[in-house]
Amino acid sequence: MQHSASLQSEHSVRHQSTLLRAVLRIMLVFSLLIGALNVFVFNAYLIASFNFISFAAAALLLLYFNDEAKLNRTSWLACLAVIFNVVMFINIAEGQNYSVLWVMIVPPIVFFLLGRRMGALLSALLFAYTVYFIAQQIDQPQPETLGLGAVLNVLEVCIALWFIYRFYEGSRETAYRELKLQSITDKLTSLYNRSHLDTLLSDLQVRMQSGALKQACIVIIDIDHFKEINDQFGHIQGDKILQNAARQLREFTRERALIGRWGGEEFLLILPNFTLTEARDYCEQLRKGIAATKHFQNLTLTMSFGVADYNPNKSIEQALIQADRALYCAKENGRNRVELATA
């Protein structure tokens, strides 16, 4: 549970960081474009000055936000910059040309960057201010608002919201995929973790029982003398050696097999549609490839393999027990070898 919470927290921070950079880039582009329009089309120099202030603020915040330790502070500054620019624009424009529509870009930004509680509070305060501001205009003569300025305000708000929600959804989907991947991955070796291996074995059993799969083999692999490696080089270097070994296993088995960390220095290899003889030959190639590789300080690793077949006449548990016994035989017979399970 703690690991799952840690993963969610890590992805939440990354998700928020992605959104923050997206919001700042949108501020940067829109402030510059709208400021240019206010200068060259409407001669609205005062409004343009606030647009250029927002442009400068977004640029400075992008430069300032160079690590996640500044995430909360930068998020607050970005939200305050957006709110300031929106409020000043509405006041200077006196609510004309649908300028009040700009308040609609604030809720998604503050909710995404500051969370539900602060997002709700700031949005409510801004909406209350907007309603108050409009109420003050009721008794005043209202000028014609259906002009070019109104069209541009509506268009710009719609485009801004489109970009904000597009970036949010893209970031959310990416974060979800990464979280899902990490939930099934062993953190040290980047192979499948024990929990996902259990799921894969259950799926294998269902396919076998349904007739979709006729045969398979299960292999338990153990790094020989790994305790001595840790004792000699230390656990940090031992972890690096374990990672290198896992990388080799993943690269070799990428196309035809499923590989995961079973526990400690043990790995589980699932070989769908393999006969026992094919699995033995496959593991022999893998064993030789591992033994021929040089690691830290020219260290060579060897691995022992216990291979068991799996068919409709036995359960997954029986196949695992047989593979484990075969592994024990491999170690008893000198290690660095492949042993087949006996019935």
Image (cartoon, helix red, strand yellow):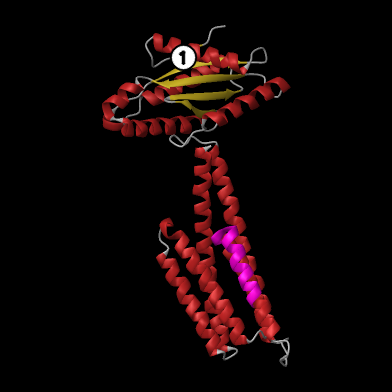
Tell me the chief SS of the magenta region: helix
Q: Amino acid at mark 1?
A: Leu
69 displayed left or right of 108: left
Q: Splitting the image into 4 quarters, where does residue 209 fall?
A: top right
Q: Residues within 10 Å of mark 1 (few under 14, many from 20)?
A: many
* Residue 121 visible (yes or no): yes
71 displayed left or right of 128: left
Q: Is residue 267 above or below residue 70?
A: above
Q: Is residue 330 above or below residue 90?
A: above
Magenta-span inclusion, residue 19: no
Q: Nearer the viewer, residue 80 or 189?
A: 80
Magenta-span inclusion, residue 124: yes
In the picture of the structure, the residue carrying the numbered disc 1 is: 327
The tally of labels here is: 1
Q: Is residue 242 above or below residue 65?
A: above
Q: Residue at x 57, y 42 (%)?
A: 180
* Residue 97 visible (yes or no): no
Q: Which residues are magenta?
A: 113-129
The picture places residue 224, in percent across and down from the top left corner, at: 37, 19
Q: Residue at x 52, y 71 (%)?
A: 80
Where, quadrant-wise, is the C terminus in this rendering?
top right
